[in-house]
Image (cartoon, rainbow, N blue to C red):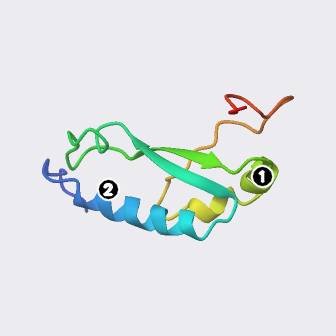
Amino acid sequence: MRGEPLVGNPDRQRATLARVAGAVTRAPWLDALLLVGSLASDTADALSDVDLLVVVREDHFEQAWADREALQVADPLCAWDQPPVGDTEVAAHR
């Protein structure tokens, strides 16, 4: 039986973030992992979630979509809203 969570340091979230960072370094289709939210602003506590943005290498989106489970290091961690429809170059740098 689980007790009430204690608000304190986000140690569990930091450990999860380290595991995801390791997965990103092993995924050749990724350029970067961007941390946003309370962990990025150093205001997180033990109840905070982990907010991440994943940057996919140019021309590798289809591979990244197919292999997205490679970043799954906790339950659940990665949420991909939907597959791309039409032009996949949203916010592409030119």
The Cα–Cα distance between marks 2 and 1, rounded to whole angstroms, is 28 Å
Amino acid carrying label 1: it is His
Q: Which residue is mark 1?
A: 60
User: Where the C terminus falls, by quadrant?
Assistant: top right
Whole-percent x and y of residue 78?
Answer: 55, 50
Relative to 15, 71 lies left or right: right
Q: Residue at x 43, y 67 (%)?
A: 19
Mark 1 element type = loop
Report x, y in % for residue 27: 64, 65
In the image, 35 versus 6, the foreground residue is: 35
Q: Marks 1 and 2: in contact by CB < 8 Å? A: no
Pinpoint residue 37: horizontal percent, then vertical percent. 35, 36
The residue located at (68%, 65%) in the rendering is: 28
Q: Which residue is mark 2?
A: 13
Task: Point out the residue furthest to the right here.
Answer: 86
Residue kind at label 2, given as amino acid type: Gln
Q: Residue furthest front?
A: 94
